[in-house]
Image: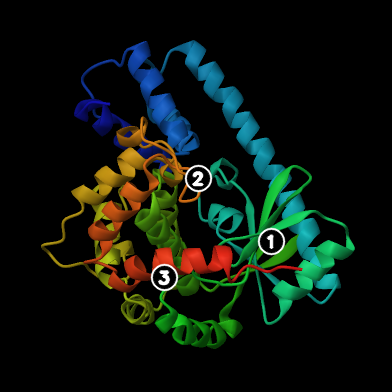
């Protein structure tokens, strides 16, 4: 995608994300260019946001009718999938709480609630975190119900429930440095009385306090950038969280969290991308970033990587070694990202591969 088309893509993304604005382009896109935009939108899982920009375009700026019809069918599928996910969230939450197992909804549909059109935020799975000893109880409950699950790396387990992918997590935050675990547990405890409730299918679902939810989502973004990359969907998630909770966030507390877990320098770069390229108003940030902050290099990595780095065109012909990763040239990419992000989040860059291996081979649950 050339720079001019990339600029148009980002304009469309901002219009759809914020539901305002107009496309500033003097030329009419060809059918081939629109096909490129559609393909790129799907690899970054933001096809809904691009679609939502259409109502703000002039007739001459819209994609060809055949592509619009294809896009509309895709939107119907997304809405149906999200509706089904909401039904399962409500059913599972009710089932768990009846067993005195207390889950907290992570990411996904909880973040979707921050979008102007929640059913248009594409969610891959349902993520649960459990209070106290709830993870172990939930694991036993799955056995009792004869639900086939697998314990996975990252101190998690996953399974299919009515054709929807579900994950349970032992840890609330994707912060890998073991030196930060006690601090993270302390802030988790201190915010217990500030958890929120999100009404999904008439069931009040517990979600994190704004500061913890933002920390969790942004730490998740960093984890994937240190590994193999991440797409624009998660970057849009960060923007929507900030704009939704801008009047509720304790800015100083969030600043201190970023600083204590050692990712503040990286967060400044993320914030620069959100305001410069994604359209987040500067006053929606909880604190300002240094004037000399540069983010174009990280946007380039996001641009190439696509959803969780699966679509990086720079490595399409690379060799895949499954013991390292399903991504082509996995070792090379991990080493490159280690060097790239070490200056901005050194402990996370160091401990990501160590904890990943530990959780996969030693720290995994075994019956």
Please, is residue 22 above or below residue 157 in the view?
above
Question: How far from the left and from the top, in percent, is residue 199?
Answer: 69, 61
Residue 43 location, quadrant: top left
Mark closer to the chain start, 3 or 2? 3
Which element type, helix, strand or loop, lies under badge 2? loop
Residue 287 at x, y percent in the picture: 27, 71
Residue 318 versus residue 30: which sits nearer the camera? 318
Number of the front mark, 3 or 2: 2
- The residue under label 2 is 322
The quarter of the image holding the N terminus is top left
**Element class at badge 1:** strand
* Front tag of 3 and 1: 1
Q: Is residue 21 visible?
A: no
Q: Can you tell which mark lies on residue 199?
A: 1
Please tell me how crowded label 3 is: few (under 14), some (14-19), or many (20+) other residues with Cα within 10 Å: few
Furthest toward the left, the residue is 292
Q: Which residue is mark 3?
A: 247
Asked if residue 74 is positioned above or below residue 44 in the image, the reply reads above
Q: Are marks 3 and 2 in contact (CB under 8 Å)?
A: no
Mark 3 to mark 1 CA distance (whole Å): 21 Å
Query: In this picture, is 71 found above or below 45?
Result: above
Tell me the residue at 71%/80% (across/down): 133
Q: Nearer the viewer, residue 153 or 243?
A: 153
- Looking at the image, is mark 3 or mark 1 earlier in the sequence? 1
Q: Quadrant of the C terminus?
A: bottom right
Q: Who's the residue at 39% across and 46% down the image? A: 330
Closer to viewer: mark 1 or mark 2 = 2
In-front residue for pair 339/111:
339
Asked if disc 1 and disc 2 are in contact, CB closer than 8 Å, the reply is no
């Amino acid at each position: 995608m050339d720079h001019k088309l990339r600029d148009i893509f980002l304009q469309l993304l901002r219009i759809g994300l914020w539901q305002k604005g107009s496309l500033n382009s003097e030329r009419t896109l060809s059918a081939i260019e629109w096909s490129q935009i559609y393909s790129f939108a799907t690899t970054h899982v933001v096809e809904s946001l691009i679609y939502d920009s259409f109502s703000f375009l002039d007739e001459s700026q819209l994609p060809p009718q055949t592509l619009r019809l294809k896009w509309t069918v895709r939107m119907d599928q997304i809405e149906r999938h999200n509706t089904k996910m909401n039904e399962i969230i409500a059913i599972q939450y009710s089932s768990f709480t009846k067993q005195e197992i207390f889950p907290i909804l992570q990411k996904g549909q909880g973040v979707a609630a921050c979008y102007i059109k929640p059913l248009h935020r594409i969610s891959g799975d349902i993520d649960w975190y459990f209070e106290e000893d709830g993870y172990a109880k939930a694991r036993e409950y799955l056995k009792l119900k004869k639900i086939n699950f697998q314990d996975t790396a990252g101190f998690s387990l996953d399974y299919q429930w009515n054709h929807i992918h579900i994950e349970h997590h032992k840890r609330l935050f994707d912060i890998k440095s073991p030196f930060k675990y006690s601090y993270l547990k302390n802030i988790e405890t201190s915010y217990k009385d500030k958890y929120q409730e999100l009404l999904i299918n008439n069931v009040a679902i517990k979600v994190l306090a704004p500061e913890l939810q933002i920390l969790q989502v942004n730490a998740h973004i960093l984890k994937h950038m240190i590994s193999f990359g991440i797409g624009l969907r998660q970057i849009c998630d960060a923007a929507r969280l900030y704009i939704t909770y801008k009047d509720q966030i304790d800015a100083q507390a969030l600043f201190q969290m970023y600083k204590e877990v050692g990712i503040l320098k990286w967060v400044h770069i993320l914030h620069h991308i959100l305001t410069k390229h994604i359209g987040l108003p500067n006053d929606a940030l909880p604190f300002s970033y240094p004037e000399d902050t540069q983010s174009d290099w990280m946007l380039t990595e996001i641009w190439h990587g696509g959803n969780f780095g699966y679509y990086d065109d720079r490595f399409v012909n690379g060799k895949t070694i499954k013991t390292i990763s399903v991504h082509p040239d996995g070792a090379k990419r991990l080493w490159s990202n280690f060097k790239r992000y070490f200056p901005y989040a050194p402990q996370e860059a160091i401990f990501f591969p160590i904890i990943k291996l530990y959780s996969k081979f030693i720290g995994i649950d075994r019956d």
